[in-house]
Amino acid sequence: MKQSTTFLVDNLGTSRRARIVDVGANPLNSPPYAMLLKQGACDVIGFEPDHSAFEELKKYESEHATFFPYALGDEEEVQFNLYRSSGLNSVFAPYEGAFTYLGRSRKNMTLIESKSMKTKKLDNIKEVPQFDLLKIDIQGGEVKVFQGARKKLSNALVVITEVRFYQLYENEPMFGGVDTELRKQGFQLLKINAIKSRIVPNSQQYSINRPIIRSQWIDGDAIYIRDLGKLDNYSDDQLRHLSLLACGVFESYDVTLFCLDELVKRGALGASIPEDFVNTFPAKMRETPEHRKAARLAARNG
């Protein structure tokens, strides 16, 4: 949806670039904001305490992207555990039950090093201005970061966070703990993407289609947005930024249209903008009266 994002960048009239904070910015995968960053439509501040991952991350620094080797939390001293797979690094030790129940690989969870670190509160980091979106994936440490960022999160619009459904680490906050904290801070769950699941081990697991028959949810990426049920709390510029982030980062085009409609009602955007935005969609994402008629006929004849 590059064309749709470009349309918004060109027509929203935002007063500044979107601001994104990435906690646990280990560059193992392309981040969801990569397209916005490539277009120069956002500024990113990232944090990654793993030295080797941070050195790799520095290759991506630019005028719009800055990174720091800090561990975030609530100013406490923690033991940061570096595992064989750096994407599993955590302040928590592995939960033994995940190995015995789900047959998880112990190889990737081999402890390479454990070092003491003093975490920093996001609220206390002067290099971080008020921001629009927080992306975070730090294997169980998310709630501490939210609690240490209440001031700066008070004006944020979006939080994208990993949430756990089945425990992988000892004493880690689960989905309920993350959800409770973010709702306290005024966010509502929009959707959960990229849910990972595993088959529950059994005697017939090699005789069944394992990609289809897998019941145990493990984790996923939850998208929370500042409650749109309280529109009076949104400024015009916040609606502009949310509409851009919804399109260019987490692919919620209906949220984008909701924001555009409100901006039109407020006289902050031209009346044709929502329709013009939809006209940037590929054909498979659009619906016309002819499409609806054809769908009804197909259903009748089906």
Image (cartoon, rainbow, N blue to C red):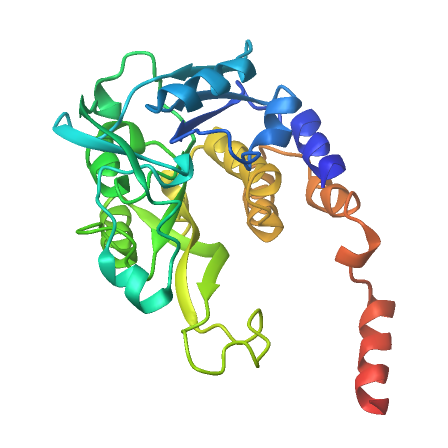
Q: As rendered, which of 210 and 242 lies closer to the eye?
A: 210
Position of 54 with respect to 285 (left or right) is left
Does 181 sit above or below residue 144? Answer: below
Dividing the image into 4 quarters, which one contains the C terminus?
bottom right
- Residue 230 in sight in this render: no
Give the mark count. 0
Q: Is residue 256 above or below residue 290?
A: above
Q: Is residue 270 visible?
A: yes
Looking at the picture, how far across and down is residue 209, in whole percent? 59, 76
**Residue found farthest to the left:** 76
User: Which of 116/192 is in front?
Assistant: 116
Q: Nearer the viewer, residue 108 or 7?
A: 108
Judged left or right of residue 49, residue 214 is right
123 lies above or below 295: above
Is 276 positioned to the left or the right of 64 in the image?
Answer: right
**Where 14 falls versus 202 (above or below)?**
above
At horizontal 37% and vertical 24% (from top left) the residue drawn is 48
Q: Residue furthest bottom?
A: 301
Give x and y (percent) for residue 101. 31, 68
Image quadrant in which the N terminus is located? top right
Q: Position of residue 239 (x, y in %)?
A: 50, 37
Residue at the extreme top of the image, as rendered: 63
Q: Where, by quadrant of the figure, is residue 154 drawn?
A: top left
